[in-house]
Amino acid sequence: MTREKILADDMNEALRVVKERFGSDAYILETRTIRERIPGTMNSNKKVELTVSLAAPPKIERKDLPPLHLGKDGRFIDETPSLESELQRLDTLLAELEVHEDRLENLDQHSYPLAKELRDWGLFNNTVARLTQDFEQEIPTVDQQNPQIALVRLASTLRFVGKMKVEELRGIHALTGPPGSGKTSLALKLADRVSGSGARVALLAFGPRHAGEVARLEEASRRMGVEIALAEDENTLVGAIRHLLSRDLILLDMPPLEDTQWDLLEKVEDALHREPVFRHLVIAADSGWRDMEGAAGAADFLAMTRTDLDVALRPALDLLPLGEFNLGFVSAGAETGSSLEMASAENMIRPLEQRVLRRQAMSG
């Protein structure tokens, strides 16, 4: 027997889909209500999930045979590529790829009106090359020296969360990132802002914490009136989240990023019957985004701290092609009263625009 899962907005719709797809031969094994992410947002919808059992199709075993054809002498000829010819083909492809990469890195980036500022900011070479190529391909030649057009085009390549205010944040949100990225400070700022709007907020700190950090969290809890809890391991983590599920917002402050954290968050979702845990990769705008390719591919959102240094665009442009995440929170200082807002084309592009204007004024 094989199993299929059906997702629908309500039970009536789910049963209708089962009947249309599988007829009267289907058996409903399990019914449950889950929450499903809404792509591009920090929200989720309730869904009904049915597990349906079907009669398994007969298994047909076959062996893949090499391609054969009949030669002039009446014998079959094996056309399976030899190992040597396959290696030669791969060598040719690698050589072509290296030529292509060299061409991208050696594009005339001076024709791109933002190239100097982006290089001075320390972006990856291939990021500047990618933006240069995109600009040259999509913008008419007559406009390719116009920095304002380049800024508009650059803004259009960024992905943002659907319009929302920080105070509207709800659900379970995990903040993770490299050491020193400002995860805890961001979690406290979010807790303070959202609880100030009247929502019930809990901050759950996961992993061993040194005494100074625990004291900091306890002091913040008293000052802000926000519930703060600690979870030492995976079992206590799931139990703590279950205990806090009635809150409007649960902020999960993760320890420094490790590859296993993404698997852990998947297990948490499974244990909570697929209650979504939104994953925020927290990056300090002035450092810490190098070697974050894997994390960018697994994150739902990119949150940036230290944006008072006017360099938030750097990690966003370098990491954006590596994942499907949207740009989320931008936070300036560590204090709870310092700037915290949602990323937008305006606040992300403004520092670059100011640099371009200063260069134009000096050269003019």
Image (cartoon, rainbow, N blue to C red):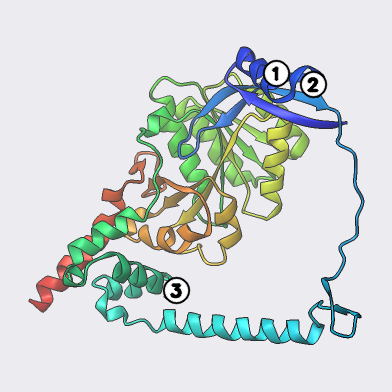
The correct choice, above or below, for 114 with respect to 32 in the image is below
Q: Amino acid at mark 3?
A: Asn
Whether label 2 touches label 3, CB < 8 Å: no
Q: Amino acid at mark 2?
A: Ala
Residue 4 is left or right of residue 171, and the answer is right
Whether label 1 touches label 2, CB < 8 Å: yes
The correct choice, above or below, for 130 with respect to 81 in the image is above
CA distance for labels 1 and 2: 8 Å
Residue shown at the point (60%, 40%) measured from the top left: 214
Image spot of residue 337 (x, y percent):
35, 39
Determine the secondary structure under disc 1. helix
Q: Which residue is mark 2?
A: 26
Q: Which residue is mark 3?
A: 126
Residue 252 is left or right of residue 63, and the answer is left
- Would you identify the image quadrant in which residue 9 lies? top right
Q: Nearer the viewer, residue 165 or 45?
A: 45
Residue 338 is left or right of residue 259, and the answer is left
Q: Amino acid at mark 1?
A: Lys
Q: In this orientation, does residue 355 appear?
A: yes
Quadrant into which the C terminus falls: bottom left
Determine the secondary structure under disc 3. helix
Badge 2 or badge 3: first in the primary sequence: 2
